[in-house]
Amino acid sequence: MRLEYFQMIDRVLEIKLEDPSIRMEARVPTTSTVFEGHFPGYPLMPAVLLIETMAQTAGLLILARIAFARIPILAAVKSAKVRRQVSPGDTLIVEGRVLHEGSGFAIAKGAISVDEKSACEAELTYRILPFPDPKVRAELESVAAQVGLRLEALDHAR
């Protein structure tokens, strides 16, 4: 996890395109400038970054399901609940599940647990749009490969 660059996910643990669900791992860094102000002397992972972590996880699942043909953009967050604090050094298990796919949008559920205890969850709505530029698609494919989501493997799963 590189908080300052919004690279929230470290690796894919499991993906099921037919289900459709995904499990990923993210390790909260022990030091980050984010923690200097949130909170001084009592560092906590900001809730908005937990939501971003869930959004990236479910977004990668959506990208995989549509074979990187378009880009899912987070459009709404509903029913977000933070159930416990997340601290530097914690290992997050992040889950995403697509609940509904429609014409130009998708709805997913995201959840994060730490030490098998629920930390947060939310319902996430995405607009599914054309890529603004081929470079954006290439960059997302690169990020997906870095976390272990390989396009070749996805083609076999279809």
Image (cartoon, rainbow, N blue to C red):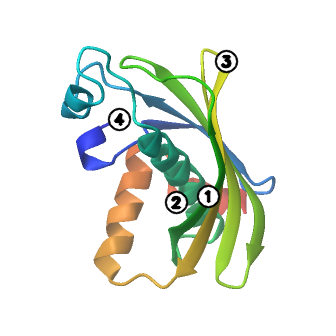
**Label 3 is placed on what type of residue?**
Glu
Q: Earlier in the sequence, mark 4 or mark 3?
A: 4
Query: On the rendered image, what quadrant is the C terminus found in?
Result: bottom right
Image point (58%, 65%), residue name:
76
- Determine contact: label 4, label 1, CB under 8 Å: no
Q: Earlier in the sequence, mark 4 or mark 1?
A: 4
SS class, disc 3: loop
Q: CA distance from mark 1 to mark 3?
A: 28 Å
Where is 42 relative to 79, above or below?
Answer: above
Residue 9: image location, x then y, percent: 44, 41
Q: Earlier in the sequence, mark 3 or mark 2?
A: 3
Q: Nearer the viewer, mark 3 or mark 2?
A: 3
Can the viewer see residue 111 in this picture?
A: no
Identify the residue under disc 1: 154
- Determine contact: label 2, label 1, CB under 8 Å: yes
Of 35 and 72, the residue lying toward us = 35
Identify the residue under disc 4: 1
Q: Nearer the viewer, mark 1 or mark 3?
A: 3
Identify the residue under disc 2: 151
Question: In the rendered image, which quarter is residue 41 located in?
Answer: top left
- Determine contact: label 4, label 3, CB under 8 Å: no
Identify the residue under disc 3: 116
SS class, disc 1: helix
Image point (80%, 57%), residue name:
18
Q: CA distance from mark 2 to mark 1?
A: 5 Å
Residue 36: image location, x then y, percent: 20, 27
